[in-house]
Image (cartoon, helix red, strand yellow):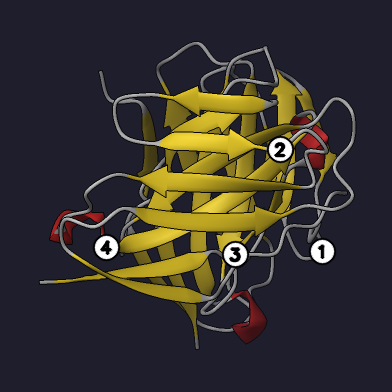
Amino acid sequence: LAKTTQPISMDSYEGQEVNITCSHNNIATNDYITWYQQFPSQGPRFIIQGYKTKVTNEVASLFIPADRKSSTLSLPRVSLSDTAVYYCLVKGGYQKVTFGTGTKLQVIP
Amino acid sequence: NAGVTQTPKFRVLKTGQSMTLLCAQDMNHEYMYWYRQDPGMGLRLIHYSVGEGTTAKGEVPDGYNVSRLKKQNFLLGLESAAPSQTSVYFCASQTGNSNQPQHFGDGTRLSIL
């Protein structure tokens, strides 16, 4: 199983761009990289997924270098409602799902 | 569209009691999962199912049993609850394409005294 490593916590002011990096040195060829967001007392919610290079959707961007051993989730202009735990997940099939401990993002007014 | 629904939301048990947690999804998903989440830790996979009538062990299966008699339901059972099973339990479902994201319920908070 590909293990992921993320910073335990991060602080950011409202309106700033936040970048959270995840290391996954043992990622396999078939693995995808998926990011989830979790608020207290709720289940994780899908944010974005990618395999290589860059992926962008309406809430975030995901940057993946050529060697795919890390990835960076970018949240543009964060607000207080973005305060949550963010999980990087390396997934190569239903039985190989591995959640790390996540990054607790605190957005400061 | 309800998505993934877990019942109950909260439960307190005494050591040695048994109970079943129910997960229901209305998205016609093939795959379903049960995770537990303990303070300061990520989600750990307990059991999963790739289709009706099939189940398999995940990372931490000991002390739990599961059943998938109907495609839309995935049951997690504790035959003899132990304090170490105090946790928040999350169910998730996913389409048959394993590269698609999982959809999670809002969890069941279980305390074993």
Do the residues marked 2 and 3 share a common chain?
no
Q: Chain of mark 1?
A: B
Instruction: Please state which of the two labelled residues, at mark 3 or mark 4, is closer to the viewer.
Output: 4
Residue B42, numbered circle: 3
Name the residue: 42% across, 45% down. Answer: A74
Distance from Cα at disc 3 to Cα at disc 4: 17 Å
Q: Which residue is mark 4?
A: A83
Name the residue: 79% across, 28% down. Answer: A93
Q: Chain of mark 4?
A: A
Percent position (x, y) of residue A49?
56, 29
Considering only vertical position in the picture, is B68 above or below B14? above
Distance from Cα at disc 1 to Cα at disc 2: 38 Å
> Considering the numbered disc 4 on the image, is that residue within a helix, a strand or a loop?
loop
Q: Give whichever of B7, A28 is nearer the camera.
A: A28
Do the residues marked 3 and 4 share a common chain?
no
Instruction: Please state which of the two labelled residues, at mark 2 or mark 4, is closer to the viewer.
Output: 2
Q: Which residue is mark 1?
A: B62
**Residue B111 seen in this snapshot:** yes
Residue A65, numbered circle: 2
> Considering the numbered disc 3 on the image, is that residue within a helix, a strand or a loop?
loop
Distance from Cα at disc 2 to Cα at disc 4: 26 Å
Q: Give whichever of B108, B59 is nearer the camera.
A: B59
Considering only vertical position in the picture, is B49 above or below B83? above
